[in-house]
Image: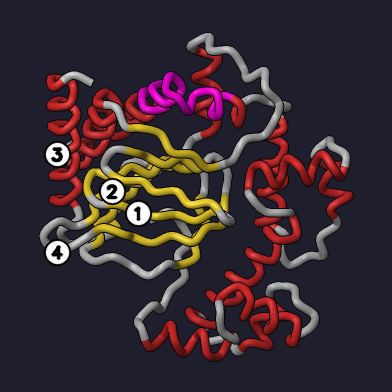
Amino acid sequence: MSKNEMDKLNSARMALAKQIYRLTEKDDHFEPGIPGLMLVRYETPTDPMSAIYEPCICLVAQGAKRVQLGDEEYIYDENHLLISSVGLPVIANVTRASKEEPLLSLVLKLDLRMLAQLMVDSNLPASLNKQSGRGMAICEVSEPLLDSFQRLVGLADTPDDIPILSPLIHKEILYRLLRSDLGPRLRQIATGGSHAQQIAHAIGWLKENYTKQLKVEGLAKESGMSVSTFHHHFRATTAMSPLQFQKWLRLHEARRLMLSESQDATTAAMLVGYESPSQFSREYKRQFGAPPLRDIKNLNRTGQTKVVTGAA
């Protein structure tokens, strides 16, 4: 990259950071009325917390954040954005932030329908590769992409323009991503009949029905795959087996119920689908490092009184 290109990139990044800083002065998780967009500020690093990253684009204008999916680690900062193409359970924390230089970031919902339509409108070919790739990825940030985000965030100052201009800029952002190194992966998730799309549907079913008994054979059949093929593509996308994914959903919802709604451990276990309180306690300790009662006391003592449900 030439010095001129680097200067343009840094200038665009600084301009976006200033926008987010100004708009988050009163609310550190600010929704500016632009569909699918949230602006985020953190003034200190955070402890690792559970979250479900729905399909979204996560861009940092200043600071850095770490996400762990299974055994894999993703770091995104001023030079790298993160995309989650399906709903994924992760552990996430802010790694670089201070009062003088807070983490300033945005989260934009990934509109998969718009993505599929854009592929048709722009004559981009559907993905020919049916092999599933990981549902989360990092790519380098470009100056044109930063400029697109800057114009999208800028609509917060002209709310009358949002209904007309925000869909156009959102489409521009997706187009630039389709033309980036992430393009093949995004085309894959948006291509009808691909394994990636079938796994995305299976993930959606699990998120809606995690309290029910999991019958992998039935879920594989609904996805149009053999059980072994389904297992392979599910793990390729999520870094987990279907059973591990369901267990994650159950345990984290139980944690939320105990933390946010003051449910006792036995009640929370039953509400999320466990039949054995002792099994719940064993699996909870394995996941969070402490039995339910001690874990909730620790979270309350340290002020972590909520379980994160999104990429913010």
Give residue 128's position: percent from left, percent from top: 67, 18
The kind of secondary structure the magenta stretch mainly shows is helix
Picture quarter with the N terminus: top left
Picture quarter with the C terminus: bottom left
Tell me whether the residue at label 2 lies in contact with that at label 1, contact meaning CB atoms closer than 8 angstroms: yes
Which comes sooner in the sequence, label 2 or label 1?
A: 1
Assign a secondary structure to mark 1. Answer: strand
Q: Which residue is mark 1?
A: 65
How many numbered dots are placed on residues in this image?
4
Give residue 54's position: percent from left, percent from top: 52, 49
Give residue 207's position: percent from left, percent from top: 65, 56
Q: Which residues are magenta?
A: 172-187
Q: Amino acid at mark 4?
A: Lys
Give residue 261's position: percent from left, percent from top: 51, 81
How far apart, in angstroms, are the residues tagged by discs 4 and 1? 16 Å
Which comes sooner in the sequence, label 3 or label 4?
A: 3
Q: Amino acid at mark 3?
A: Met
Q: Which residue is mark 3?
A: 14
Front: mark 2 or 4 = 4
On the rendered structure, is 97 left or right of 245? left
Q: Amino acid at mark 2?
A: Ser
Q: Residues within 10 Å of mark 1 (few under 14, many from 20)?
A: many
Q: Which residue is mark 2?
A: 105
How far apart, in angstroms, are the residues tagged by discs 2 and 1? 10 Å
Residue 186 in the magenta stretch? The answer is yes
